[in-house]
């Protein structure tokens, strides 16, 4: 049974991915949340699924200590390693702020959070990933991190776009480094999704990009899971939309 670990599983796209994987009846899902006790919707899933399908672990993606604790807790559950890690947790602090208005402290926070979280989480998991059959590292990025596409969206999520562009470089370089070990890295844009992060840019999207659909987490999650399964070592370090098409860098 393939094993998956998803960060930011308390709500939004992360929770959607957990639900999608559980519905498939063939996955062991480790749902990582920084505050499992307050993640009510996630907790409710434990009434429906046994511990050998769903295990919830406390994990703060900004704390190496927290990740070390989580890895200690889950290692005995993964005798065949960890097939997939989905680095989903992210922050989006200044949605519609011009460069004249941008708050530097918050810019630093967004860039640091979105670029360091996948390293903090994934590095200690590498031995488990290397031991697995699938060996896949998934990074949830954004189309806003595309220099070519996101670069044209004037006035939208400037700090966040910078953070996701840097994240794309991280995924591409790390993927190249890991390829000889047989580990695949994929960067996936999850679509424009009805979550706290997605809803924060509704005004801008309705005005300047009215044709882009505002999809539900379930639709996004189905695409992310499909792309995650479909990517191969040959296509490692590619930048995907959730519908399975490639984005330009
Ligand atoms: P949400 O705001 O709904 O969810 C964010 C998640 O990140 C929550 O589960 C939150 O947990 C978690 N999180 C925040 N800080 C930490 C932390 N320190 N440790 C662990 N978890 C943390 O956003 P989305 O579901 O929309 O976003 C998921 C990903 O998708 C992000 O990387 C985002 O950038 C990306 N994305 C989203 C788009 C959209 O339209 N929604 C578009 C493009 C990309 P908690 O409940 O504890 O706060």
Image (cartoon, rainbow, N blue to C red):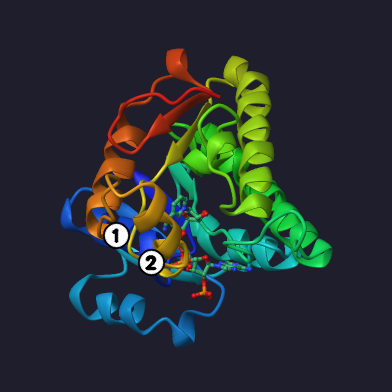
Q: How many marks?
A: 2
In the figure, 57 relative to 138: above or below? below
Between 64 and 215, the one lying in front of the other is: 215
Measuring 46% from the left and 87% from the top, which residue is drawn there? Answer: 38
Label 2 beta carbon within 8 A of ligand 1: yes
Image quadrant of residue 44? bottom left
According to the picture, the residue beneath numbered tag 1 turns out to be 217
According to the picture, the residue beneath numbered tag 2 turns out to be 195
Which element type, helix, strand or loop, lies under badge 2?
loop
Q: Residues within 10 Å of mark 2 (few under 14, many from 20)?
A: some
Label 1 beta carbon within 8 A of ligand 1: yes
Between 34 and 126, the one lying in front of the other is: 34
* Quadrant including the N terminus: top left
Q: Position of residue 238 (x, y in %)?
A: 48, 23
Q: Position of residue 33 (x, y in %)?
A: 50, 70
Q: Position of residue 131 (x, y in %)?
A: 51, 34
Contact check, label 2 and label 1, Cβ < 8 Å: yes
């Amino acid at each position: 049974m393939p094993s998956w670990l998803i960060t930011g599983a308390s709500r939004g796209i992360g929770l959607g991915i957990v639900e999608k994987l559980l519905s498939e009846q063939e996955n062991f899902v480790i749902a990582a949340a920084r505050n499992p006790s307050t993640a009510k919707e996630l907790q409710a899933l434990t009434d429906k699924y046994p511990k050998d399908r769903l295990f919830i672990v406390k994990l703060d993606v900004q704390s190496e200590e927290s990740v070390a604790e989580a890895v200690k807790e889950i290692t005995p559950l993964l005798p065949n390693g960890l097939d997939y890690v989905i680095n989903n947790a992210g922050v989006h602090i200044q949605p519609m702020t011009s460069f004249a208005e941008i708050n530097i402290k918050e810019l630093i926070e967004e860039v640091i959070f979105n670029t360091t979280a996948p390293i903090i989480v994934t590095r200690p998991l590498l031995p488990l990933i290397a031991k697995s059959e699938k060996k896949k590292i998934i990074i949830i990025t954004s189309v806003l991190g595309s220099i070519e596409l996101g670069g044209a969206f004037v006035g939208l999520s400037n700090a966040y776009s910078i953070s996701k562009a840097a994240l794309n470089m991280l995924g591409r370089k790390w993927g190249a480094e890991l390829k000889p070990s047989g580990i695949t890295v994929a960067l996936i844009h999850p679509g424009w999704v009805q979550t706290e992060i997605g809803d924060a840019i509704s005004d801008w999207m309705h005005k300047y990009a009215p044709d882009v659909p505002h999809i539900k987490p379930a639709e996004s999650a189905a695409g992310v899971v499909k792309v995650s399964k479909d990517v191969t070592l040959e296509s490692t370090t590619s930048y995907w939309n959730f519908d399975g098409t490639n984005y330009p860098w």
